[in-house]
Image (cartoon, coloured by chain):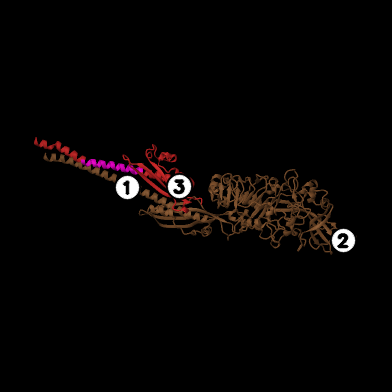
Amino acid sequence: MLLNKRSAMSLIELIITVMVISLAVIPMLLSITSTNVQVYSMGKHQLAALAARSLLDRLMLLPYEECHQKCLEMGADMALLADPEFAALAGRIDFENRDFDEMTSRVAVYDAANAEEQERLFVIEVTVSWPVPKSYERRHISFKTIKYQTRI
Amino acid sequence: MINKSQHKSGSVYLLAVGLMSLLILLIFSISRYSGGRARLVSLADQKQTALYALEAFYGDMISQIRVRIRDKDEALINSFISATEGGTPGFSYVPGQTLSELFEEQQISIKSSEMFFEQVEPLKYPAMVTYPGDRPREKRGRLCITNEVTFLGRNYKLTVKVPFKTVFTLTPVLRQFAFFADRIHLEQREKQGLNDRINIIPIEKGSSISTSGGPPRLPLCLGMSIKPHDQINSDNEKEGYVYLGKSDQNIILNLAGEIQPGEGELSDLWQVNVEHFKPVETTGRSIEHASVNTLRGNIQNKTLSIPLRIRNTRANLRLVGFCRELADENGPWYKELRYVLESDPGFRKYDTSREALSLSSGIRILGASFEAGAIAARIPYPRNVRNVFGRVFNRFFVLSIFDFPSAYLNTKLRYTSEPSYLPPPGESSYGDKFNFEIESGSYRNYMSRTMSGNPAETGQDFDHQNAPANLAADNTPKVFTFSDFHGSDGVTLTEPLDRFAGQWFFDLHSAALKSDLERVESSVIGRITRVYRDQEEFKEEVGLADGKLWINGVVAVDGDLTLEDLPPETDIRGGIVLVNGKITLGNISRGLAPSSLPPVQMMLTRDYLDYLRSLKPEDILTFVSLSGDQIKLTDNVQIGVHLVSLKELEGPEQMLTYANPGKVLFAGALALSTPYLDRLTTEFRDELPLFSYPPEMATTKPPLATVIEDNLEGYDYVVE
């Protein structure tokens, strides 16, 4: 009988085993969750970079004056999808628009460094930001370049 | 049993450890994936940041080059003009302040920068144009720019190839012509009568008169400069050539007559040169004003008096031009002419249309007469000449008399078609007889006749009855063909001038261009440096709103172009504007102050001649209607403008029109297939119009514009 009793795990042993495994698994699961969030965020970052590049490239293709005017118009934060051109573009790669729906863009224009250059160039900076899930924090990415007047 | 229970307990632990190991492996791999992805994302951002920096970098270089070209940096411009494979632009690049600050902010450092020319090749010409090998050529090529930067430990390199062109801003060949009408023969389907729509200006007392009750027609007057005797017929390219085509068609211009020298501004007989009477020996002789008693009293007649072999005998060749006085049956010439030219077919044609004897040419290729009044005293005779291309002949009459002045011989020398004819001896009023014995030429060179009555019938360009309007360098009348054309830039031609437009200009959407790249490259289309979608884009880009009109190259406007009056102070930089449609222009006065003088009289003033000379070739605006549409001028002062509208035609079209008939002042050049003189001459009012040629349009060094194009022909981005 004694032998029979010893052959099974006691309740205490079982509880301890479950507790040990739980202590080890829970942080691991948390870590997995965290990694998933990080990966998700990377995806957002990539999409935001894509959006910023797309916006900046489109602006750079415009004639000088038109580009300057458009940049000024886009100076405030605005939802990416409020831009019909971008919405059409995004529609082709994100059918439900879920990836971009909370992204915003802002275009900043900086004058050239001196008067001579101000006649023929300005600096454009495009910033795209997106919210961090379950947080009030927003992340952003920006690209900056110079727009030159070609009709000199 | 103990072993068995221990084995069971160990299995649980083993299972737990295994499970944990799997979880750890899972986390490790997810972590690696996440980390790798993060690194990739980071690299992509850096790569993009570096790319934008590199694009800003080459943009700064191109921008600086453009600024220097705009500011006429000779060294840089010449380096493009003389660009060779592997050569470098003539300037030292220093990064602009804005670019430097951007790089500093982004912690980007410049590693290397290189710029050189590649694929440089001369632009081609049509087969009929021979361009000299020792002159600067129009070119196209690419500026290869390779920039390398370092950003966060990595090197990034961008190579771009930026196309450029160096093109003439004046149209080759055409720029040499003050007036070029390659189909004007369509306005003269017959050489005399109702279908002669070139000779349409009725003349009386040396001026145009109205025969319809309305305002009189005024001829298109091409201005001429005034030169000292010893410089006449030299540097003719600076007067601007004239071409009246087609090249195989005769164009006859009636010279306006006069009763008294200097009567009116339209008398043309001063254009007749003693050389028109070769082979008669005329060395040292000139055409002078001689008094003649006529039924209408004493008149002054331009006369070439040639001594004959018998002492004191002379042949007096009186010149008679087209005017009402000639057409008048009771006028000073008609009856006499009808008698002496009875068998001259050139004159007999007027028997049924005598009024046509009053009509002179609607175009004055040598300008107005300046013999009138006090001016006559200042202006040497004969006047200056210009080169006239095409089979252009002057029509006038010669009324010849065999004379012995002191014996009142006055024997009329009648027309004959017989080559060996000799007139009977002349008899003086005293009964003495004098033989007509000549030193040079034949009787036909002395007799009365119609000059250029109908050159097509004779087969010879210059003989006793044909008077080409053009004089060769030795002053011999000569029909100039394409082979006589020598552009001041050394260009020569291998085909008639009337074929030039067909090989040079094409509609922008021409089907012929799509299938023939050679045509594109060898025509003006291959020289286009910028295309504007419409005139609004053109006006914006050339700076009209800023008081500028900067062409600087060969630009094309797809559609019509209308330019209102340009403010006098408009900053103009010349070039060629190809318009795929209609052209409408207002005033382009370039600040020329209005003058109270009649336009043609301005050619006599030093101020205006100096002003003409001051018009630089690089400032001349050339407007070309590629579709050959009518060019409309809504106002009447255009300075430094070359207007071109050429196309194949079946009948004449008015390719230039003045919307507000009035006093016209034009400085530049016209190239119109048909000006349609019949209509155009009704649009000049108040004063004779002046179309003057800026001498610098004939420069030996036509201006070349260097244009960096907007597009790229190569793009290579490398991350090392």
The answer to whether marks 3 and 2 sit on the same chain is: no
Position of residue B469 measured from the top left corner of the image (x, y, whole percent): 72, 55
| Image quadrant in which the C terminus of chain B is located | bottom left
Residue under numbered circle 1: B36
Indicate the quadrant containing the N terminus of chain B: top left, top right, bottom left or bottom right.
top left
Structural distance between the alpha carbons of marks 1 and 2: 124 Å
* Disc 3 target residue: A60
**Tag 1, which chain?**
B
The number of numbered discs placed on residues in the rendered structure image is 3
- Inspect the image, locate mark 2, and give the three-letter code of the amino acid beneath it: Ala
- Give, as a single range, the part of the protein colored magenta: A23-44
Rendering coords of residue B389 (x, y %):
68, 54
Residue most extreme to the front = B596
Q: Does residue B156 appear in the picture of this structure?
A: no
Q: Amino acid at mark 3?
A: Met
Crowd tier of the residue under label 3, counting other residues whose Cα lies within 10 Å: few below 14, some 14–19, many 20 or above: some
Q: Position of residue B532 (x, y in %)?
A: 54, 46
Estimate the spatial distance between the alpha carbons at disc 1 and disc 3, rounded to whole Å.
Answer: 32 Å
Q: What color does chain B have in the rendering?
A: brown
Specify the chain shown as red.
Answer: A
- Which is nearer the N-term, disc 1 or disc 2? 1
Displayed quadrant of residue B486: bottom right
Please identify the dominant SS of the magenta region. Answer: helix
Q: Nearer the viewer, mark 1 or mark 3?
A: 3
Is B373 or B28 nearer to us in this picture?
Answer: B373
Circle 1/circle 3 CB separation < 8 Å: no
Q: Is residue B276 left or right of residue B426?
A: left
